[in-house]
Image (tube, rainbow, N blue to C red):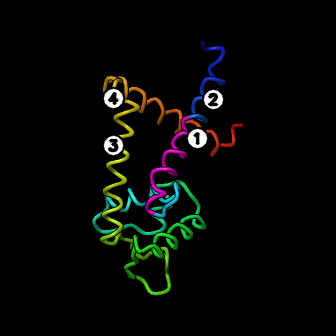
Amino acid sequence: MLENRFELFDVSVSLICKSIQKIKSEKVLQYGLKSSHVLFMVQLGRSEDGLTAAELSEVGHVDKAQISRVISELTSKGYVTKKSLHQGQKYKNKLKLTEAGRRVTHEINEIIVNVLETVSGSIPMSDLEVFYRTLFTISDNLTSMLCQSQI
């Protein structure tokens, strides 16, 4: 198995990413959303005080251009509102879910719970804890390696 671990890891991660994208796309289509909106809706739903564009960028590991597009789309759909704290500085203003945004995010969270229960319900919690700890370690190590240009 160790001799094939690159192939196993690469194929498994690719299949998981594709499956997650497809599930997100199909499940949020009814709300007029795209899969790229899901993480940001969930993150905003967890924040009572709202988040700035910079904070959303950091959480989602995406560039500011994508954040600007997502914020614009979510605002035009009436799911997000901007709370101006600093005039003329759009990345420092807080973004919050509207009532409609909170309702949709609640429904999205229910979908997420159902999906997670379906795909990991038979896996013991102790195994899931080891899996996620290992996954985060691999992610951190890859990020560190890229930052140090060791490739």
User: In the picture provided, is 9 more to the left or to the right than 118?
Assistant: right
Question: The residue under label 2 is which amino acid type?
Answer: Val
The local crowd at label 3, few if under 14, some if 14 to 19, many if 20 or more residues have their Cα within 10 Å, is few
Residue for badge 1: 18
| Of residues 91 and 31, the one drawn nearer to the viewer in this rendering | 31
Q: Nearer the viewer, residue 84 or 21?
A: 21
How far, Cα to Cα, is label 4 from label 1? 21 Å
In the image, the segment drawn in magenta is 16-31
Q: Which of pointers 4 and 1 lies earlier in the amino acid sequence? A: 1
* Marks 4,1: beta carbons within 8 A: no
- List the residue tagged with mark 3: 113
Task: Give the image location of residue 115, x and y in percent.
Answer: 39, 39
Residue under numbered circle 4: 121
Whether 95 is drawn above or below 110: the answer is: below
Residue 102 in magenta stretch: no
Q: Secondary structure at mark 2?
A: helix
Q: Please name the amino acid that badge 1 sits on.
A: Lys
| Residue 149 image point, x, y percent | 69, 42
Q: Is residue 22 magenta?
A: yes
Give the mark toward the camera: 4 or 2.
4
